[in-house]
Amino acid sequence: MLPFRVMTRSTSSRLASWRAMLPQIAAQEDELRKLDDYGLRKRSLALRYRAKSGEPLYRLIVDGFSLVREAGRRTLNLRHFDVQLLGGIAMQFQSIAEMQTGEGKTLTATLPLYLAALSGKGAHLATVNDYLARRDAEWMRPIYKALGISVGIIQSQMPSHDRRKQYGRDITYGTANEFGFDFLRDRLLKRRIDEGESDLLGGMLGAASGQSTEKPVQRELEFMLVDEADSILIDEARTPLIISALPGEDEAIAADCYRWAAEMAEKFEEDEHYEYDHRYRTVELNAAGRRLARKLPKPESMNSVGLSLIYEYIEQSVKVSREMFLDRQYVIRDGEVVIVDEFTGRLAEGRKWRAGVHQAVEAKEGVEVTFPTSQAARVTIQDFFLRYKHLAGMTGTAATSTRELLKIYDLAVMVIPTNRPPIRRALPTRVFGTGEQRWQAIAHDVVAVHETGRPVLIGTRSIDKSEHLSHLLRDGGVEHTVLNASYIEREAEIVADAGRHGKVTVATNMAGRGTDIKLAPEVTELGGLHVICTEMHQSERVDRQLIGRCGRQGDPGTYQQYVALDDDILREGLGPKRAAKLAEIGESGSGAFDHYAPLFRRAQKRIERMHFRDRKALLYHEKERRKVQFQMGQDPYLDTPG
């Protein structure tokens, strides 16, 4: 625990006290540079002894951070800036460090991770995808190795014996989902062991990935540093992590029901046959819709299915037909429906939508319908991370979520100054009557910027929209590269080239978090990278992540937002009636619509508030559910057997 005097200080006074450590760290540089590699590691081992002897880690900050800075300088030629040291100190004192994009969060993370590793209890870093976990761990490994610290990496589909080995290292990098699912698998294993059944858990615990689960893979949850903290702790917090139990015996009938409902969904009309709640996105058949459902011809296998279930199948299929679209929320790969993560633009391999949504999508696309399953274990993102004794994080976009992070996780957001003054410049938001007018204007503007030689990064919200813009650019004779989940194997190559002279890159959210676009020298003189935001996202933080690809580390750069009066964000944020009127104005009107720009931010704010309420409600209900199970003597993270 931190001393009370530190926890109660204001943000400004805490930053001031932390700054006082910087000269102390700098004072050790000359001495450490004189040491050979063996001498540096010996210093590290001495510090480890002090930590294991019970000396509080916050008292080791000056000595520990000095060692990490020197190790970074001599192994990677990367010397931590003073602002990175401040960010590391903030995380050591259990805060979220908001560091602008391009300020070197990956290098900053080595500071608190090293200090936590000294205790020998294990330190975890959670990031948003396997690619970033592997990239950052391998990139920073030489620093840790120079100080005698071992590094592990958790990847999806990794067998449990390998996971156990990786968790046994001093520092372990992985994704939030992998850490959470391993926690649940270990809980399930513990229950089986307690019941006297220490054999393998079978298919439910990973037969598909060849996992063997004779003993738990994780140690105690001691230290967690969350990279892209707002994305993981907030955006992903609405979806609990769930391990499914084995399916029941009526899979064939259920599959027939989903396929039948998918074929019949188009016969049901809004208001005539069902009511659609635009806020909660629910479909409910009315009396006419139920009559129609009863009349429609059905396969013989459905004779034993109750009417209430038939209504639910129809409602699910109607919901999917109007909300879920190929190359937006999902793709078809090797005959399977694979979810596209809405926040990262990446494929969410192994994940499935719950409550029959995934099966309804499979039926809609005509692929094999997998069987709906019950849950064996579940945990929310909030509850899982709160189980760590020390929680901290870093991101470039947390300040707008300060209240939520403090309320839910008891984490203060500390805004760390930039190493160099940012000179990123915003251009006026452009508003168009229709989406197609917007796409045409973007294609036209890209040509103009491209002719100057400046690189252009264009952010889109989905795969299909990135492909549509790519088609328009090809028609306009603009050579470009597309980065989305369909081209994931070329990601590193595409990002590496995106800052070159005259380069045009069309990307989904994959080009947002974790990508560092380095400018070619001649590009800086031309004005740097130009970022085009083709739509507003449901969260301002996602927009800011894309914008943050330009103007990094004092580089020049510009960005511009493009929106249209028929955009989904207006319907979601202002309601269907208001959105319909605006879309009608956009369709029939002419001239400039730029004066409508404030409406889009207003709609975005309302959606953010709604999602905040959803997350609070989920946390409340999960707490109540766990309380009941705990009172009944059951593991609150596992479903009751039988």
Image (cartoon, rainbow, N blue to C red):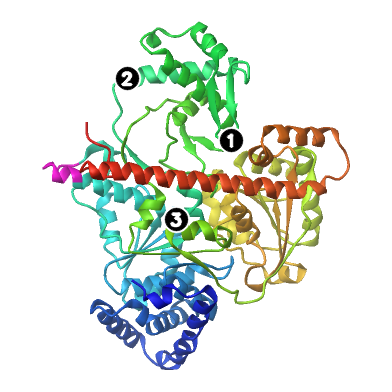
The mark closer to the camera, 1 or 2, is 1
From the image, tell me which residue sits under label 3: 408
From the image, tell me which residue sits under label 2: 250
Q: Give the amino acid type for the residue marked by disc 3 in the picture.
A: Ile
State which quarter of the image contains the N terminus.
bottom left
Residue 170 numbered mark, or none: none
Sequence-wise, which precedes: disc 1 or disc 3?
1
Q: Is residue 329 visible?
A: yes
From the image, tell me which residue sits under label 1: 279
- Crowd rating for badge 1 (residues with CA inside 10 Å; few <14, some 14–19, many 20+): some
The residue range painted magenta reads 191-200
Rendered location of residue 92, percent (x, y): 41, 72
- Crowd rating for badge 2 (residues with CA inside 10 Å; few <14, some 14–19, many 20+): few
Rendered location of residue 607, percent (x, y): 60, 45
Q: Give the amino acid type for the residue marked by disc 2 in the picture.
A: Asp
Above or below, 552 against 627 in this view is below
Could you tell me which secondary element the residue under label 2 belongs to? loop
Q: Give the amino acid type for the residue marked by disc 1 in the picture.
A: Arg
Q: Are marks 1 and 2 in contact (CB under 8 Å)?
A: no
